Every structure is written in structure tokens, then in C-alpha cells.
Image (tube, rainbow, N blue to C red):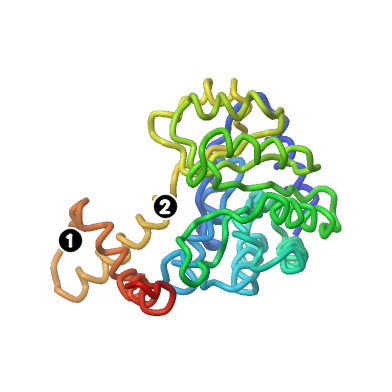
């Protein structure tokens, strides 16, 4: 693998004065498809990795070694720069160091470490945020752990989903004092929020799950958004296609059509979403 070349190409993306929409990829073949179609970079999301490796919903039951192995298979099979969602770094700041070492060795071009309180703690709400200085320590640990300066480290925050805009902006300004390569924002819902973020930092911005009404490349580019995710429909489409083909073979019919309202229900059924919710209530929510 020529890791330096693909890492250099990701850094070139961050220098461009336009926004890129990455391919959501999950295995060697989807990575090769994205590369052949001309995508500039690919994204391996934590939720997609959990679906693909475990058949489980995104509750951080995937391990670091499983994520690193998946990333390595993708990087070995294709030359597309890979950005990986490394969740909370699988523990504290020391675990973050290990996470960076493993993913860098796997060949990824960039990774995100987030300030979300993961996994969900006992008797605590899901998707809260850790203390700002703890997050700063984890981001600095990630920066210190990389051996190749070409590897991109992004500070990811979910503060916009759980705090007031003012509180979120305070965090973003704090995170921007570090030598991270950009800020990955989860939960941006409108242009006003994005403009407020842009007003407090000049760092490159990356968006997770970009709303449909915010997919204007020119406006995103003007606000220094370099990468904007568009969801992970490529994976769900692959699941639905496989399900439909198996159903055709089993029922000996020529065509199977899965109606749109049933697609989400099918994914939840296949990933045992109800079981995980029951286990969360049984083990983590004492009042239920």
C-alpha cells in the first residue's frame, strides 16, 4: 500500500476551495467501485462497520481490532483515501493512542475522534458529551500518537446535538486551538448554525449526515466545508439487493420489490435493533 500517496491526496482535498461528497464504503469491492466511479475519498462509518462486521446496530459493541481489520482490507484492496470514524477512540486518552496506532498501521488516510460519551454509561442518557478538557486530552493524544505526519486527525463533536449553540461554539473554539487537521461536525441542521461555526474557526470543516436542504456545494464551499457526508445508502442498498435476490431464489419468483416503508424495518430486524434496545433498558436504565 502506498499510504503516503493517498494521505497526500486527502490533504489536497482539504486545500481545495470546494466541498467533496465522499463515498460510504464498507469492504474491498465497495471501495473499488467508488474508486472506479471517480470518488476522491471514501468514508468508513462506525455504524456501517458495526452493521457489516457484527450485524449489530451502532451501540459501540464493535472492537478496535475489528475496525482496524476492516479498514486494512479496504486499504489493501484499493487506492482510495479512506477516512475512518474511530468513535471515542475506544476508551480514554491512552486508548486513543492505541486506536491511532492501529488505524495508521492499517493504512487509513484520516480518522475522527469524538467528544461523545461512549459507550452509554449506566443510568445515563445516550449520546451525551464528555468534559471539554477530557476531549482536549483525547485529541492531543491522537495527534501525539501518529507516526506519519501525513495522517489526518479530525476532532469530531456532537455538541450541536446536545448543547446550546453558544455552548457548542465554545467547545469548537477550544478544539480549534489544537493542531488538528479539521473539525468534524455532527448535527448541523441549518445554514445559521454552520455560519456561526465558520465565524469562530478557520479550520477545514467536515459534516456528518448533511441535511438534504444543505447539499448546495457552492454554499458549503463558501463556508469552508471540505467534506460533507450524504448518509450510508450504499450499504442499505446492498443489503436490500441481497435480501431481494435471496427471497427470489427461496420463493422461486422472478421479481421482488421491497417497499420504501419496509426498508428501515428490515434493517432494524436484521441488526436485532429491538433486542439491543431491550438489553439497554434491562442493563443500563434502572428506572425501566
Give residue 214's position: percent from left, percent from top.
Answer: 44, 29
Give residue 41's position: percent from left, percent from top.
Answer: 61, 45
* The disc label shown at residue 285, or none: none
Give residue 187's position: percent from left, percent from top.
Answer: 48, 42
Q: Could you tell whether 162 is left or right of 168 in the image?
A: left
Give residue 76's position: percent from left, percent from top.
Answer: 67, 63
- At numbered mark 2, what does the secondary structure look like: helix, strand or loop? helix
Residue drawn at point x = 39 percent, y = 50 percent:
233
Residue drawn at point x = 77 percent, y = 68 percent:
94
How many labels sit on residues? 2
Dividing the picture into quadrants, the one containing residue 207 is top right
Q: Nearer the viewer, residue 77 or 198?
A: 198
Q: Could you tell whether 19 is left or right of 245 in the image?
A: right
Residue drawn at point x = 26 percent, y = 71 percent:
246
Mark 2 against mark 1, which lies toward the viewer? 2
Q: Is residue 37 visible?
A: no
Dividing the picture into quadrants, the one containing residue 180 is top right
Label 1 crowd (10 A; few <14 / some 14-19 / many >=20): some
Q: CA distance from mark 2 to mark 1?
A: 19 Å
Q: Nearer the viewer, residue 162 or 28?
A: 162
Residue drawn at point x = 80 percent, y = 50 percent:
4
Q: Which residue is mark 2?
A: 234
Q: Earlier in the sequence, mark 2 or mark 1?
A: 2
Q: Is residue 286 visible?
A: yes
- At numbered mark 1, what does the secondary structure look like: helix, strand or loop? loop
* The disc label shown at residue 256, or none: 1
Dividing the picture into quadrants, the one containing residue 92 is bottom right
From what the image shows, is residue 241 above or below residue 167? below
Q: Could you tell whether 52 is left or right of 248 in the image?
A: right
Which quadrant: the C terminus? bottom left
Amino acid at each position: 500500500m502506498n499510504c503516503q500517496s493517498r494521505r497526500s491526496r486527502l490533504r489536497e482535498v482539504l486545500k481545495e476551495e470546494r466541498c467533496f461528497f465522499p463515498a460510504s464504503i464498507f469492504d474491498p469491492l465497495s471501495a473499488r467501485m467508488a474508486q472506479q466511479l471517480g470518488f476522491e475519498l471514501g468514508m468508513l462509518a462506525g455504524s456501517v462497520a458495526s452493521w457489516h462486521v457484527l450485524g449489530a446496530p451502532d451501540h459501540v459493541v464493535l472492537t478496535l481490532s475489528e475496525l482496524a481489520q476492516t479498514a486494512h482490507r479496504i486499504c489493501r484492496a484499493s487506492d482510495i483515501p479512506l477516512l475512518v470514524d474511530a468513535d471515542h477512540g475506544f476508551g480514554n486518552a491512552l486508548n486513543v493512542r492505541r486506536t491511532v496506532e492501529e488505524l495508521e498501521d492499517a493504512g487509513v488516510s484520516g480518522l475522527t475522534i469524538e467528544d461523545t460519551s461512549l459507550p452509554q454509561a449506566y443510568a445515563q442518557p445516550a449520546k451525551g458529551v464528555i468534559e471539554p478538557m477530557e476531549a482536549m486530552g483525547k485529541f492531543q493524544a491522537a495527534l501525539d500518537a501518529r507516526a506519519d505526519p501525513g495522517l489526518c486527525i479530525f476532532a469530531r463533536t456532537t455538541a450541536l446535538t446536545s448543547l446550546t449553540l453558544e455552548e457548542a461554539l465554545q467547545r469548537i473554539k477550544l478544539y480549534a486551538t489544537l493542531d488538528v487537521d479539521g473539525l468534524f461536525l455532527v448535527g448541523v441542521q441549518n445554514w445559521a448554525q454552520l455560519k456561526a461555526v465558520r465565524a469562530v474557526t478557520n479550520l477545514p470543516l467536515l459534516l456528518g449526515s448533511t441535511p438534504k436542504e444543505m447539499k448546495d456545494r457552492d454554499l458549503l464551499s463558501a463556508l469552508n466545508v471540505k467534506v460533507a457526508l450524504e448518509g450510508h445508502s450504499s450499504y442499505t442498498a446492498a443489503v436490500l439487493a441481497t435480501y431481494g435476490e435471496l427471497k427470489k431464489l427461496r420463493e422461486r419468483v422472478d421479481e421482488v420489490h421491497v417497499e420504501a416503508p419496509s426498508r428501515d424495518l428490515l434493517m432494524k430486524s436484521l441488526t436485532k435493533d429491538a433486542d439491543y434496545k431491550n438489553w439497554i433498558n434491562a442493563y443500563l436504565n434502572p428506572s425501566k
